[in-house]
Image (tube, helix red, strand yellow):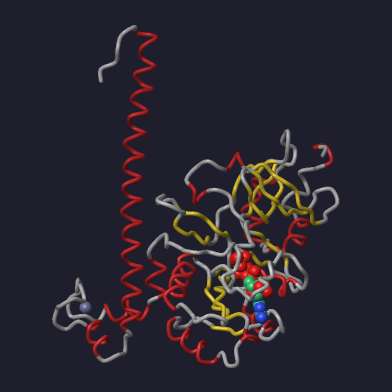
Amino acid sequence: MSSSSFSSSAAGGSAAGSVLSPYGWTAELSEQFELFAEAGLVPARLARVDRGQADAVLADPGTGELRTVRADTRPVSGGAAPANPCTGDWVALDLAAEPMTAVAALLPRRSAIIRKGAGKSSEGQVLAANVDTVLIAVSLALDPDLGRVERFLALAYESGAEPLVVLTKSDLVGDAEFVREDVERIAPGVPVLVVSAETGAGLDVLRACMGATSALIGQSGAGKSTLTNALAGHQVMTVQRTREGDEKGRHTTTTRELFALPGGGVLIDTPGLRGVGLYGGEGLQQAFAEIDELAGRCRFPDCSHLSEPGCAVRAALADGTLAQRRWESYLKLQRENEWIAARTDARLAADRVRGWKQRSKEARGNIRPWHGRRAPS
Ligand SMILES: Nc1nc2c(ncn2[C@@H]2O[C@H](COP(=O)(O)OP(=O)(O)OP(=O)(O)O)[C@@H](O)[C@H]2O)c(=O)[nH]1
Ligand SMILES: [Zn+2]
Protein backbone atom coordinates (compact mmCIF):
# COMPACT_ATOMS: atom_id res chain seq x y z
CA MET A 1 0.00 0.00 0.00
CA SER A 2 1.34 3.41 -0.85
CA SER A 3 1.49 5.89 1.96
CA SER A 4 1.00 8.89 -0.34
CA SER A 5 -2.62 7.93 -1.06
CA PHE A 6 -3.63 8.75 2.50
CA SER A 7 -4.20 12.32 3.50
CA SER A 8 -4.31 13.23 7.14
CA SER A 9 -7.19 15.64 6.65
CA ALA A 10 -9.80 12.90 6.33
CA ALA A 11 -8.49 11.04 9.36
CA GLY A 12 -10.77 11.21 12.36
CA GLY A 13 -13.00 13.63 10.54
CA SER A 14 -16.67 13.35 9.72
CA ALA A 15 -16.05 10.76 6.99
CA ALA A 16 -14.64 8.34 9.54
CA GLY A 17 -17.40 9.35 11.94
CA SER A 18 -20.36 8.35 9.82
CA VAL A 19 -18.77 5.23 8.37
CA LEU A 20 -17.52 3.96 11.72
CA SER A 21 -20.59 4.81 13.78
CA PRO A 22 -22.16 1.35 13.29
CA TYR A 23 -18.93 0.11 14.85
CA GLY A 24 -19.53 2.26 17.92
CA TRP A 25 -17.58 5.40 16.97
CA THR A 26 -18.95 8.39 18.90
CA ALA A 27 -18.55 12.16 19.00
CA GLU A 28 -16.67 11.73 22.26
CA LEU A 29 -14.15 9.38 20.64
CA SER A 30 -13.84 11.79 17.75
CA GLU A 31 -12.91 14.52 20.19
CA GLN A 32 -10.37 12.30 21.93
CA PHE A 33 -8.90 11.52 18.54
CA GLU A 34 -8.24 15.09 17.41
CA LEU A 35 -4.56 15.18 18.36
CA PHE A 36 -3.95 11.83 16.71
CA ALA A 37 -5.69 13.06 13.56
CA GLU A 38 -3.46 16.12 13.49
CA ALA A 39 -0.50 13.74 13.65
CA GLY A 40 -1.79 12.01 10.50
CA LEU A 41 -3.10 8.93 12.31
CA VAL A 42 -6.39 7.23 11.43
CA PRO A 43 -8.99 5.79 13.86
CA ALA A 44 -9.79 2.09 13.70
CA ARG A 45 -11.38 -0.62 15.81
CA LEU A 46 -9.61 -3.91 16.40
CA ALA A 47 -11.76 -6.81 15.21
CA ARG A 48 -9.30 -9.57 15.98
CA VAL A 49 -5.91 -9.75 17.62
CA ASP A 50 -3.34 -12.47 16.96
CA ARG A 51 0.25 -12.66 18.05
CA GLY A 52 1.76 -9.29 17.26
CA GLN A 53 -0.86 -8.34 14.66
CA ALA A 54 -4.51 -7.34 14.45
CA ASP A 55 -7.33 -6.89 11.96
CA ALA A 56 -8.33 -3.25 12.19
CA VAL A 57 -11.56 -1.80 10.75
CA LEU A 58 -11.26 1.75 9.46
CA ALA A 59 -12.81 4.28 7.13
CA ASP A 60 -10.36 4.42 4.24
CA PRO A 61 -9.11 8.03 4.14
CA GLY A 62 -8.96 7.83 0.33
CA THR A 63 -12.34 6.33 -0.55
CA GLY A 64 -14.17 6.88 2.75
CA GLU A 65 -15.28 3.25 2.66
CA LEU A 66 -15.02 0.64 5.38
CA ARG A 67 -11.92 -1.46 5.10
CA THR A 68 -10.06 -4.01 7.20
CA VAL A 69 -6.27 -3.89 7.32
CA ARG A 70 -3.65 -5.99 9.06
CA ALA A 71 -1.73 -3.91 11.53
CA ASP A 72 1.37 -4.47 13.62
CA THR A 73 0.40 -4.23 17.31
CA ARG A 74 3.90 -4.47 18.70
CA PRO A 75 4.34 -0.71 19.18
CA VAL A 76 1.57 -0.80 21.83
CA SER A 77 2.29 -4.26 23.30
CA GLY A 78 4.72 -5.62 25.82
CA GLY A 79 3.57 -3.82 28.93
CA ALA A 80 1.36 -5.32 31.62
CA ALA A 81 -0.93 -7.93 30.04
CA PRO A 82 -4.25 -6.13 30.75
CA ALA A 83 -2.94 -3.09 28.87
CA ASN A 84 -2.18 -5.03 25.70
CA PRO A 85 -4.39 -4.40 22.65
CA CYS A 86 -7.46 -6.62 22.36
CA THR A 87 -10.62 -7.06 20.32
CA GLY A 88 -12.85 -4.01 20.66
CA ASP A 89 -10.05 -1.54 21.28
CA TRP A 90 -10.15 1.79 19.46
CA VAL A 91 -6.72 2.61 18.12
CA ALA A 92 -4.76 5.20 16.17
CA LEU A 93 -3.31 3.64 13.03
CA ASP A 94 -0.19 4.75 11.23
CA LEU A 95 -0.98 3.72 7.64
CA ALA A 96 2.36 5.02 6.41
CA ALA A 97 4.44 2.88 8.77
CA GLU A 98 6.99 0.57 7.14
CA PRO A 99 7.05 -2.31 6.48
CA MET A 100 3.36 -2.48 7.43
CA THR A 101 0.53 -0.46 8.96
CA ALA A 102 1.09 -0.11 12.68
CA VAL A 103 -1.04 0.56 15.74
CA ALA A 104 0.51 3.75 17.07
CA ALA A 105 -1.70 4.22 20.13
CA LEU A 106 -4.63 2.72 22.04
CA LEU A 107 -7.48 5.02 23.00
CA PRO A 108 -8.63 4.92 26.65
CA ARG A 109 -11.08 2.07 27.28
CA ARG A 110 -14.63 2.66 28.46
CA SER A 111 -14.88 -0.88 29.81
CA ALA A 112 -12.95 -4.13 29.57
CA ILE A 113 -13.69 -7.77 30.34
CA ILE A 114 -10.63 -8.99 32.20
CA ARG A 115 -10.17 -12.45 33.55
CA LYS A 116 -7.36 -13.94 35.55
CA GLY A 117 -4.69 -15.23 33.19
CA ALA A 118 -4.25 -18.94 32.64
CA GLY A 119 -1.99 -20.99 34.86
CA LYS A 120 -0.22 -19.66 37.90
CA SER A 121 0.19 -16.18 36.49
CA SER A 122 -1.65 -13.49 38.38
CA GLU A 123 -1.74 -11.24 35.32
CA GLY A 124 -5.12 -10.34 33.88
CA GLN A 125 -6.12 -11.26 30.34
CA VAL A 126 -8.39 -8.88 28.45
CA LEU A 127 -11.12 -10.66 26.51
CA ALA A 128 -12.86 -7.63 25.00
CA ALA A 129 -12.71 -3.86 25.33
CA ASN A 130 -15.27 -1.05 25.10
CA VAL A 131 -18.25 -3.30 25.69
CA ASP A 132 -21.71 -1.97 26.60
CA THR A 133 -23.55 -5.26 27.16
CA VAL A 134 -22.04 -8.54 28.31
CA LEU A 135 -24.18 -11.44 27.12
CA ILE A 136 -23.67 -14.47 29.34
CA ALA A 137 -24.64 -17.52 27.29
CA VAL A 138 -25.97 -20.48 29.27
CA SER A 139 -27.22 -23.63 27.53
CA LEU A 140 -30.69 -24.83 28.46
CA ALA A 141 -29.67 -28.30 27.27
CA LEU A 142 -27.69 -28.86 30.47
CA ASP A 143 -28.56 -28.45 34.13
CA PRO A 144 -27.58 -24.85 34.78
CA ASP A 145 -24.44 -24.47 36.89
CA LEU A 146 -25.58 -21.52 39.00
CA GLY A 147 -22.15 -21.03 40.57
CA ARG A 148 -20.68 -20.60 37.13
CA VAL A 149 -23.35 -18.09 36.16
CA GLU A 150 -22.59 -16.11 39.34
CA ARG A 151 -18.93 -16.14 38.40
CA PHE A 152 -19.68 -14.84 34.89
CA LEU A 153 -21.95 -12.17 36.38
CA ALA A 154 -19.19 -10.93 38.68
CA LEU A 155 -16.81 -10.89 35.71
CA ALA A 156 -19.35 -8.92 33.67
CA TYR A 157 -20.02 -6.36 36.41
CA GLU A 158 -16.29 -5.98 36.94
CA SER A 159 -15.91 -4.98 33.28
CA GLY A 160 -18.03 -1.88 33.71
CA ALA A 161 -20.61 -3.10 31.16
CA GLU A 162 -24.24 -4.17 31.73
CA PRO A 163 -24.74 -7.92 32.15
CA LEU A 164 -27.52 -9.89 30.48
CA VAL A 165 -28.08 -13.64 30.74
CA VAL A 166 -29.06 -15.46 27.55
CA LEU A 167 -30.46 -18.96 28.01
CA THR A 168 -29.73 -20.66 24.68
CA LYS A 169 -31.08 -23.66 22.74
CA SER A 170 -34.66 -23.24 23.99
CA ASP A 171 -35.80 -25.50 21.13
CA LEU A 172 -34.21 -28.43 22.98
CA VAL A 173 -36.31 -28.10 26.13
CA GLY A 174 -40.05 -28.21 26.73
CA ASP A 175 -40.25 -25.47 29.29
CA ALA A 176 -37.49 -23.00 30.03
CA GLU A 177 -39.48 -21.17 32.69
CA PHE A 178 -38.13 -23.07 35.72
CA VAL A 179 -34.54 -22.51 34.71
CA ARG A 180 -35.27 -18.88 33.96
CA GLU A 181 -36.67 -18.38 37.44
CA ASP A 182 -33.68 -20.11 39.06
CA VAL A 183 -31.28 -17.91 37.15
CA GLU A 184 -33.28 -14.76 37.86
CA ARG A 185 -33.01 -15.49 41.57
CA ILE A 186 -29.22 -15.47 41.45
CA ALA A 187 -29.05 -12.49 39.07
CA PRO A 188 -31.12 -9.80 40.80
CA GLY A 189 -31.92 -6.93 38.45
CA VAL A 190 -30.37 -8.66 35.44
CA PRO A 191 -32.53 -9.46 32.39
CA VAL A 192 -32.67 -13.20 31.72
CA LEU A 193 -33.73 -13.98 28.15
CA VAL A 194 -34.65 -17.28 26.52
CA VAL A 195 -33.56 -17.77 22.91
CA SER A 196 -33.03 -20.34 20.21
CA ALA A 197 -30.56 -19.65 17.44
CA GLU A 198 -32.06 -22.64 15.66
CA THR A 199 -35.66 -21.34 15.45
CA GLY A 200 -34.98 -17.65 15.96
CA ALA A 201 -37.21 -17.52 19.04
CA GLY A 202 -36.41 -14.64 21.38
CA LEU A 203 -33.84 -13.03 19.07
CA ASP A 204 -35.84 -9.83 18.53
CA VAL A 205 -36.09 -9.21 22.27
CA LEU A 206 -32.38 -9.94 22.61
CA ARG A 207 -31.52 -7.48 19.82
CA ALA A 208 -33.58 -4.80 21.52
CA CYS A 209 -31.66 -5.29 24.79
CA MET A 210 -28.18 -5.11 23.28
CA GLY A 211 -26.06 -1.97 23.54
CA ALA A 212 -23.88 -0.60 20.74
CA THR A 213 -21.16 -3.13 21.52
CA SER A 214 -22.07 -6.50 22.98
CA ALA A 215 -19.74 -9.33 23.93
CA LEU A 216 -20.73 -12.96 24.30
CA ILE A 217 -19.11 -14.93 27.07
CA GLY A 218 -19.87 -18.40 28.35
CA GLN A 219 -18.78 -21.96 28.59
CA SER A 220 -17.60 -23.80 25.51
CA GLY A 221 -20.57 -25.29 23.72
CA ALA A 222 -23.05 -22.81 25.19
CA GLY A 223 -23.95 -21.80 21.63
CA LYS A 224 -22.14 -18.47 21.37
CA SER A 225 -20.90 -18.89 17.81
CA THR A 226 -24.27 -20.16 16.62
CA LEU A 227 -25.94 -17.17 18.26
CA THR A 228 -23.40 -14.82 16.68
CA ASN A 229 -24.25 -16.23 13.26
CA ALA A 230 -27.99 -15.91 13.94
CA LEU A 231 -27.64 -12.28 15.05
CA ALA A 232 -25.30 -11.42 12.18
CA GLY A 233 -27.81 -12.92 9.75
CA HIS A 234 -25.15 -14.97 8.01
CA GLN A 235 -22.35 -17.36 8.81
CA VAL A 236 -19.55 -15.37 10.38
CA MET A 237 -18.31 -18.01 12.81
CA THR A 238 -17.46 -21.61 12.08
CA VAL A 239 -19.60 -23.85 14.24
CA GLN A 240 -18.55 -27.46 14.63
CA ARG A 241 -21.66 -29.54 14.63
CA THR A 242 -21.17 -32.24 17.17
CA ARG A 243 -22.61 -35.30 15.46
CA GLU A 244 -23.54 -37.23 18.57
CA GLY A 245 -25.10 -34.18 20.11
CA ASP A 246 -22.15 -33.91 22.46
CA GLU A 247 -22.95 -30.96 24.69
CA LYS A 248 -19.41 -30.31 25.75
CA GLY A 249 -18.49 -28.26 22.71
CA ARG A 250 -15.12 -28.44 21.04
CA HIS A 251 -13.53 -25.06 21.45
CA THR A 252 -14.29 -24.08 17.92
CA THR A 253 -13.67 -20.40 18.60
CA THR A 254 -10.01 -19.74 19.05
CA THR A 255 -9.72 -16.01 18.56
CA ARG A 256 -11.98 -13.19 19.64
CA GLU A 257 -13.75 -11.59 16.75
CA LEU A 258 -15.89 -8.56 16.31
CA PHE A 259 -18.76 -8.39 13.83
CA ALA A 260 -21.06 -5.65 12.62
CA LEU A 261 -24.73 -6.48 13.08
CA PRO A 262 -27.38 -5.72 10.43
CA GLY A 263 -29.28 -3.26 12.62
CA GLY A 264 -26.09 -1.41 13.66
CA GLY A 265 -23.83 -2.16 16.58
CA VAL A 266 -21.24 -4.88 16.90
CA LEU A 267 -20.96 -8.24 18.58
CA ILE A 268 -17.78 -9.75 19.98
CA ASP A 269 -17.63 -13.54 20.25
CA THR A 270 -15.11 -14.87 22.75
CA PRO A 271 -13.72 -18.39 22.93
CA GLY A 272 -15.44 -20.78 25.32
CA LEU A 273 -14.13 -20.27 28.80
CA ARG A 274 -13.52 -23.44 30.76
CA GLY A 275 -12.64 -21.64 33.91
CA VAL A 276 -12.92 -17.94 34.45
CA GLY A 277 -10.87 -16.68 37.32
CA LEU A 278 -12.00 -13.31 38.56
CA TYR A 279 -9.59 -10.44 38.35
CA GLY A 280 -10.71 -7.76 40.75
CA GLY A 281 -13.25 -7.17 43.46
CA GLU A 282 -16.03 -4.66 42.89
CA GLY A 283 -17.87 -6.89 40.42
CA LEU A 284 -18.38 -9.48 43.13
CA GLN A 285 -20.13 -6.94 45.37
CA GLN A 286 -22.47 -6.06 42.52
CA ALA A 287 -23.19 -9.66 41.57
CA PHE A 288 -24.04 -10.42 45.20
CA ALA A 289 -25.66 -7.10 46.00
CA GLU A 290 -28.15 -8.58 48.47
CA ILE A 291 -25.31 -10.09 50.56
CA ASP A 292 -23.53 -6.76 50.57
CA GLU A 293 -26.76 -5.20 51.74
CA LEU A 294 -27.26 -7.81 54.49
CA ALA A 295 -23.70 -7.35 55.76
CA GLY A 296 -24.45 -3.66 56.12
CA ARG A 297 -27.18 -4.53 58.61
CA CYS A 298 -24.98 -6.63 60.94
CA ARG A 299 -24.62 -5.15 64.44
CA PHE A 300 -20.83 -4.90 64.11
CA PRO A 301 -19.45 -3.15 61.05
CA ASP A 302 -16.52 -5.60 60.95
CA CYS A 303 -18.75 -8.65 61.46
CA SER A 304 -17.13 -11.86 60.20
CA HIS A 305 -20.60 -13.47 59.88
CA LEU A 306 -19.28 -16.45 61.84
CA SER A 307 -20.44 -16.12 65.45
CA GLU A 308 -21.13 -12.48 66.29
CA PRO A 309 -24.49 -11.56 67.84
CA GLY A 310 -26.82 -9.51 65.66
CA CYS A 311 -25.39 -10.90 62.40
CA ALA A 312 -27.88 -10.21 59.60
CA VAL A 313 -26.17 -12.69 57.25
CA ARG A 314 -26.52 -15.61 59.68
CA ALA A 315 -30.10 -14.60 60.39
CA ALA A 316 -30.89 -14.63 56.67
CA LEU A 317 -29.23 -18.04 56.31
CA ALA A 318 -31.24 -19.35 59.27
CA ASP A 319 -34.62 -18.20 57.95
CA GLY A 320 -33.81 -19.20 54.37
CA THR A 321 -33.88 -15.67 52.88
CA LEU A 322 -30.28 -16.28 51.85
CA ALA A 323 -29.61 -19.69 50.31
CA GLN A 324 -26.67 -21.61 51.75
CA ARG A 325 -25.48 -22.41 48.22
CA ARG A 326 -25.41 -18.74 47.29
CA TRP A 327 -23.51 -17.77 50.46
CA GLU A 328 -20.89 -20.47 49.86
CA SER A 329 -20.56 -19.45 46.24
CA TYR A 330 -19.92 -15.87 47.37
CA LEU A 331 -17.30 -16.95 49.94
CA LYS A 332 -15.53 -19.07 47.35
CA LEU A 333 -15.28 -16.23 44.82
CA GLN A 334 -14.22 -13.82 47.54
CA ARG A 335 -11.37 -16.12 48.63
CA GLU A 336 -10.21 -16.31 45.02
CA ASN A 337 -10.28 -12.55 44.71
CA GLU A 338 -8.24 -12.11 47.88
CA TRP A 339 -5.71 -14.59 46.60
CA ILE A 340 -5.38 -12.78 43.29
CA ALA A 341 -5.06 -9.42 45.07
CA ALA A 342 -2.31 -10.80 47.29
CA ARG A 343 -0.51 -12.28 44.29
CA THR A 344 -0.77 -9.02 42.39
CA ASP A 345 0.57 -7.05 45.34
CA ALA A 346 3.44 -9.51 45.74
CA ARG A 347 4.27 -9.27 42.05
CA LEU A 348 4.18 -5.50 42.04
CA ALA A 349 6.46 -5.45 45.09
CA ALA A 350 8.84 -7.87 43.37
CA ASP A 351 8.78 -5.70 40.23
CA ARG A 352 9.63 -2.64 42.28
CA VAL A 353 12.60 -4.38 43.92
CA ARG A 354 13.77 -5.70 40.56
CA GLY A 355 13.42 -2.27 38.96
CA TRP A 356 15.38 -0.67 41.77
CA LYS A 357 18.17 -3.27 41.56
CA GLN A 358 18.32 -2.76 37.79
CA ARG A 359 18.54 1.00 38.13
CA SER A 360 21.26 0.85 40.76
CA LYS A 361 23.19 -1.63 38.62
CA GLU A 362 22.90 0.71 35.63
CA ALA A 363 23.99 3.59 37.81
CA ARG A 364 27.09 1.66 38.86
CA GLY A 365 27.73 0.73 35.24
CA ASN A 366 27.55 4.36 34.22
CA ILE A 367 29.97 5.48 36.86
CA ARG A 368 32.69 2.95 36.11
CA PRO A 369 33.95 4.13 32.70
CA TRP A 370 34.37 7.71 33.73
CA HIS A 371 35.67 7.32 37.24
CA GLY A 372 37.53 4.07 36.89
CA ARG A 373 36.34 2.84 40.23
CA ARG A 374 33.51 0.80 41.59
CA ALA A 375 30.50 2.68 42.75
CA PRO A 376 29.64 2.16 46.40
CA SER A 377 27.09 -0.61 46.74
N1 LIG B 1 -30.75 -27.21 18.98
C1 LIG B 1 -29.93 -26.17 19.06
N2 LIG B 1 -28.59 -26.36 19.03
C2 LIG B 1 -27.79 -25.30 19.13
C3 LIG B 1 -28.29 -23.99 19.28
N3 LIG B 1 -27.25 -23.13 19.37
C4 LIG B 1 -26.14 -23.90 19.28
N4 LIG B 1 -26.44 -25.19 19.13
C5 LIG B 1 -25.48 -26.33 18.98
O1 LIG B 1 -24.64 -26.37 20.12
C6 LIG B 1 -23.29 -26.76 19.75
C7 LIG B 1 -22.28 -25.72 20.26
O2 LIG B 1 -22.55 -24.47 19.63
P1 LIG B 1 -21.44 -23.36 19.41
O3 LIG B 1 -22.13 -22.17 18.84
O4 LIG B 1 -20.25 -23.90 18.69
O5 LIG B 1 -20.99 -23.07 20.91
P2 LIG B 1 -19.88 -22.03 21.42
O6 LIG B 1 -20.37 -21.51 22.70
O7 LIG B 1 -19.55 -21.04 20.38
O8 LIG B 1 -18.64 -22.99 21.66
P3 LIG B 1 -17.09 -22.54 21.65
O9 LIG B 1 -16.78 -22.03 20.29
O10 LIG B 1 -16.38 -23.84 21.98
O11 LIG B 1 -16.93 -21.52 22.70
C8 LIG B 1 -23.32 -26.91 18.24
O12 LIG B 1 -23.47 -28.27 17.95
C9 LIG B 1 -24.55 -26.10 17.82
O13 LIG B 1 -25.10 -26.60 16.63
C10 LIG B 1 -29.73 -23.81 19.32
O14 LIG B 1 -30.29 -22.71 19.46
N5 LIG B 1 -30.49 -24.94 19.21
ZN1 LIG C 1 -22.60 -10.52 60.13
Q: Position of residue 289 (x, y in %)?
A: 38, 78
In percent of the image, x 39 and y 70: which residue is there?
Answer: 284
- Decide which of 66, 145 is in the foreground and name it: 145
| Picture quarter with the C terminus | top left
The answer to whether residue 159 is visible is yes
Judged left or right of residue 120, residue 264 is right
Up the image or down, 205 lies above or below 284; here it is below
The total of numbered circles placed on residues is 0
Q: Nearer the viewer, residue 166 or 246?
A: 246
In the image: residue 110, left or right of residue 99? left
**Image-based side of 356 in relation to 90, left or right:** left
Question: Which corner quadrant of the image does residue 4 belong to?
Answer: top right
- Residue 259, x across and y down, in percent: 71, 64
Q: Position of residue 150 (x, y in %)?
A: 43, 74
Can you tell me which quadrant of the image ligand 2 is in? bottom left
What residue is shown at x 68% (from left), y 79% (from top)? 197
Q: Residue 274 placed where, x, y %? A: 50, 64
Tell me the residue at 54%/48% (across/down): 84
